[in-house]
Amino acid sequence: SPGRSEARAGNFASIPETPGMASPGRLARMRRFFDRSNQGPSTAIATGIADTQADQGAQVVPGQVAVATSAVGGAEEQQEQSHAAPTQNAEESVAKPEPEPKPEPEPTPASAGQDVDAAIKEFDGVDPISGIAVRAVGAVGIVNTTFSGIETLSDTYLKPFKVFNQVVSTLADVHPYAKAALGILTSTSQLFMNQANLDKAVSDLLDTMRNVYEWLIQEDRIRNLDKDALAKIAWAISDSAHFVINYSATKSFWTRTGKHIFSETRTVVDDHAKTLQNLMQQCRDRAARDIQVNTYRILEDLNFEGMAYAGGAGLNTTKKCLEGTRTEILQRILDWINDPDVGAPRIMWLHGQAGRGKSAIAHTIASWVKDVGGLGSCFCFARDRQNEHREEKILITIARDLAGRDQSFRRALADALSRDHTLKTTPDVVQQWQKLILEPLSKVNEAIVGNVAVVIDALDESGSDASRKHILSLLRSPDAAQLPSNFRILLTSRPLADIKRVLSTAEHVIALSLDNIPILSAERDIQLYVSTELAPYPEIGPAESQNISQKSDGLFEWARLVCRFIEPNRPGRTITERYKEVMFPHPGGGGSLLDVMYRTILEDIMPQDDITLARFRSVMQQIMSTSVPLRLDALHEMRSHFPPEEDRFGITVIVEFMAPLLSGIADRCSVVRPLHASFYDFLTDHKRSGVYYIAESNMHRLLAFASLHTLCN
C-alpha cells in the first residue's frame, strides 16, 4: 500500500547520524601501528624464492623474470630480458606458500571511537607484514609477453582497507558531497578485500593505493580534507581499481592489438601511481584544487556505431542545488546508494508537486557520482522533447553510458550487440532491459568498482500514460527487485496517478515525497537561495529574504520567479516596490502560489492591449508547437514566412522581456523554451491563465508553410 512504501522511507528530514569522529589520539595510535607494519624486512620473500629455486634445481634463463615484492612500501621488480630465443624446458619457480592466516572478524559499525579502539586493540597484536605470497612464472613468449605471477592478498596486507572502512563508519557531520567520495573509497576497499588473487604486475599500483588509505586514516585527515580534494582522490582510486580488477582482460586486449604488454602495463601503473602520489602531496600543500586528475581507463574500441542514443537527455550541471541546500535529502539518497545491505531496495522514487526542486536534486546526485569517479547514467525527460520519443531510447542510452565508463560492461554489451544487431535501434524497452541491461550486468557485476547509480529525471514529462507504461512495468517487475545489490535507480516525477499506482506499492521501491518536507527545513534552504541570488541588492536584507522564504510554501520554482521579478530589469519601479508587490499582491488573484507568480510577472512585462496580447499568444503558440525547441534566429526566420502579414513581426518584441520565464533569450545559440514545465500547464489552462491563455490554433499549418518556404529558398 502507499502507506507501507512511505513508511519504509522514514522521516528523511531528520537523518540519523553516526556518532562523532574518532579522536586524533586514537588515529595517532593507528598511525604508529602502520609505521610499525611498514618496517617488515623486504628480503624475506626474495630469499624464499631463491631457496625454492635451489631446491627444485630451477634456472633463471634469458627471458625469464624473477620477482620479489616488499612488505608494504611498494613492489620491487627485477627483470632480465633478452632478445635471444628463450631456453626451452624452462621450469616455473614457485614460492613456498605462507601459513594460512587465521580468519578475522568482519568490521562492523559501532559508536564513535569504540570501533576504532577495538580495531587498534585487535591490530596491536599483529606482527609487521612479512610480505605477499609470490610465484615467479617461467617464460611463455618473447617480445610481447609480460612475466607476472599471481599474488594472494593476505588478511594482514588488507588491514588498511578494513581500518579505513571502520573509521569511515564513525564519521558524523560529513558533507553529502564528501560522503559520495567516501562511498567510492569504501566500496573500492571492500572490492579488494573480496578479491582473492591479483596479477603480480599490478602489485606496485595496489601498494600505492594501500598507502593512500593509510595516509587518509592518519591525523584525522579524512575529516579535515577539503571535499573537492577528497572527490579527486576517490576518482583516482576508482580509476586505479578499475585497471587492477580488469587487468587480465586488458592484457588480452593489448595482445590482440599487437602492443607490448609489459611496456603498456608499466606506463599505466606509473601514471596511476603518479596521480595518487601527487594528490597526496598537493593535499599536504593545501593546493589540491589545482591538481588535474588524469583519467586513464582502458576502453576497447568496440563497435557501437549505429546504436541509438538520446542526445541532450543527460546531465545538466546548471540545474544542481545551490551549495548548502537540500543537505538532508541529498544525504539520505547517498546513504541509500552506498548501503552495503544486499537487501536494500534497488529503486528510490522521489516525487512532489511542480516547483519542489526534484530535478535539482536529481542532477546534483548525478553530478556528484560522476565527480568522484562513480559508474552511472543520467537520463532526463522533457515536456518540450516529447516528439523525440525518448521513452524508446531510455535503456539503450543508459547502457551506452555505463559502457563508456566500465570496461567489463562495455565488453558484455558489445557481445550482446554482436549476436543481435537489431538491438542497436530497437524501440522495444523490454528487449533493451533484458539484453542490454540485465544480461550484461549478470556477467560483470563482480568486476564493477563501487555502486552503480542511474538517475531518471521527470518521468512524468515523457508524454501520455502510454508512453511510460512499459517502463513502469519493468521498474515494478521481479527483475528490478533482483538487480545486483550495488545497482541503484533514482527516479523523479510528479505523483501522477499512473506512476503512483505502480511504484507506491512495490516492495523494492523507496518512496520519498518532497511535499512532506518539514516547512522549517524548506524555508531554511529557500532563504539561503534567495539571499544568494539577491545579494547584489542591499534593499533585500536578511529580513526580506526570510519573508520570501516563509511565503514560498517550500516551492523553489516560486522563489526563483520572485528573485527574477525583483531584479531591476524593467524601468518604473524600485527594487523595494517590486518586493512589496510580491509580498502583498493585488486582492482577488487566487490560485496557487505559482499561478499568482506567473500572472504577476506577465502583468509586469506584457501590457494587456489587444495587439500585444495577440502577439504574445502567437509567439507562445509557435514556441510550444514546434516538434523540438528551436533557437531564436530559427523562430524568427520561420515567422518571416507566415502567410498572415500581421504575424510577420520580429519575435524579439515579445521574448526579449520574458527572461524570467523562458531560456535561450540572451544566447542565440541556445534553444528557446519555458524554464519550468509548470508554465506550460499554466498557459494551457484557461481558468488559471485568463487573458494569457494559449488555445488550440492553426499554428501547425503556419509552421508547415514556413518550413516548406524555407526549404524552397
Image: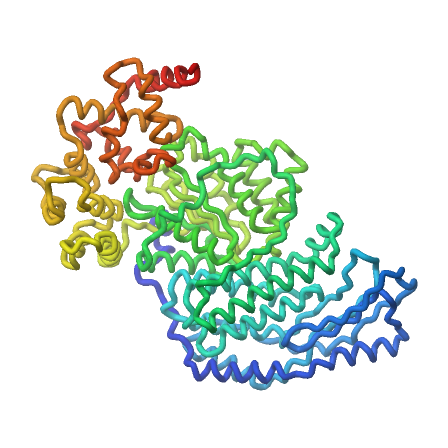
Looking at the picture, tell me which residue is in the foreground, 299 or 417.
299
Looking at the picture, tell me which residue is in the foreground, 197 or 48.
48
Give the image location of residue 107, x and y in percent. 53, 73
Can the viewer see residue 599? Answer: yes
Can the viewer see residue 464? Answer: no
> Residue 452, relative to residue 66: is it above or below?
above
Q: Residue at x 64, y 64 (%)?
A: 270
Q: Is residue 203 left or right of residue 32?
A: right
Coloration of the structure image: rainbow
Q: Residue furthest right?
A: 88
Q: Residue at x 61, y 31 (%)?
A: 422
Looking at the picture, tell me which residue is in the foreground, 189 or 673.
673
> Residue 373, relative to residue 429: is it above or below?
below
Q: Residue furthest left?
A: 587
Residue 162, quarter of the rendered image: bottom right
Give the image location of residue 496, x and y in percent. 33, 39
Q: Residue at x 20, y 38 (%)?
A: 598
Give the image location of residue 425, x and y in percent. 56, 32
Give the image location of residue 167, x and y in percent. 47, 73
Question: How many marks can you see?
Answer: 0
Q: Quadrant of the C terminus?
A: top left
Q: Is residue 469 left or right of residue 357?
A: right
Q: Residue at x 22, y 58 (%)?
A: 520
Looking at the picture, tell me which residue is in the foreground, 6 or 428.
428
> Residue 404, relative to residue 126: is it above or below?
above
